[in-house]
Image (cartoon, helix red, strand yellow):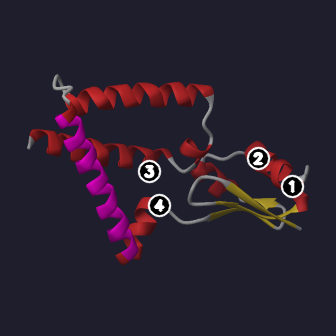
Amino acid sequence: MELILRGAALYLFLLLLFRVLGKRSLAETTTFDFVLLLIIGEATQQALLGNDFSTTNALVLITVLMGIDLAFVKLKGKYKKLDRLLEGTPLILVDHGKPLKGRMKEAKVDTEDILEAARISHGLEQMHQIKYAVLERDGQISIIPS
């Protein structure tokens, strides 16, 4: 039972942690972020399993975590408010070439992030060429050219 409670608590903690860090924390994976995720993964594994590294324990834990994830998927489908709380909503960052600085600060996105997305997706180089830039739920920036 302790294993199940530990697994559920860590799952919820990491879900909350990545929600607080924002959408961009998962979309912009740098080398530093990757190393940090590996360390978090190792620490989480040790916290979940403790000193019991048996296959049975691992299978129980995987089943519990998948069960929690499936429950959240069903709950999010049924309760749209929960879906918005956990996954967020798209956020307009640029409106007709004008950066919305308050929203950008809230989302931890700077002008260079938006221009990079514009270059990659449409070959655009300047802000006035962007009709809308939208931070999507998955942390990617979508560009709608002028």
CB under 8 Å between callouts 3 and 2? no
Where does the image place residue 30, in percent across and percent down from the top left? 62, 31
Q: Nearer the viewer, residue 92 or 51?
A: 51
- Disc 1 marks which amino acid? Met
Q: Earlier in the sequence, mark 4 or mark 2?
A: 4
Q: What is the span of residues highlighted in magenta in the rendered image?
A: 56-77
Residue 108 appears left or right of 3: right
Residue furthest front in the image: 55
- The residue to which callout 2 is attached is 111
Q: Kindly report the distance in space between the C-alpha atoms of the residues bearing marks 3 and 2.
A: 22 Å
- The residue to which callout 1 is attached is 127
CB under 8 Å between callouts 3 and 1? no
Task: Classify 109 as above or below 67.
Answer: above
Where does the image place residue 139, in percent across and percent down from the top left? 60, 52
CB under 8 Å between callouts 1 and 2? yes
Q: Earlier in the sequence, mark 1 or mark 4?
A: 4
Residue in view at x 58 percent, y 52 percent: 106
- Disc 2 marks which amino acid? Thr
CB under 8 Å between callouts 4 and 2? no
Where does the image place residue 105, in percent across and percent down from the top left? 62, 49
How packed mark 3 is, by other alpha carbons closer than 10 Å (few <14, some 14-19, many 20 or more), is some
Where does the image place residue 1, in percent across and percent down from the top left? 8, 44
- Disc 3 marks which amino acid? Arg
Q: Which mark is residue 87?
A: 4
Q: Secondary structure at mark 4?
A: helix
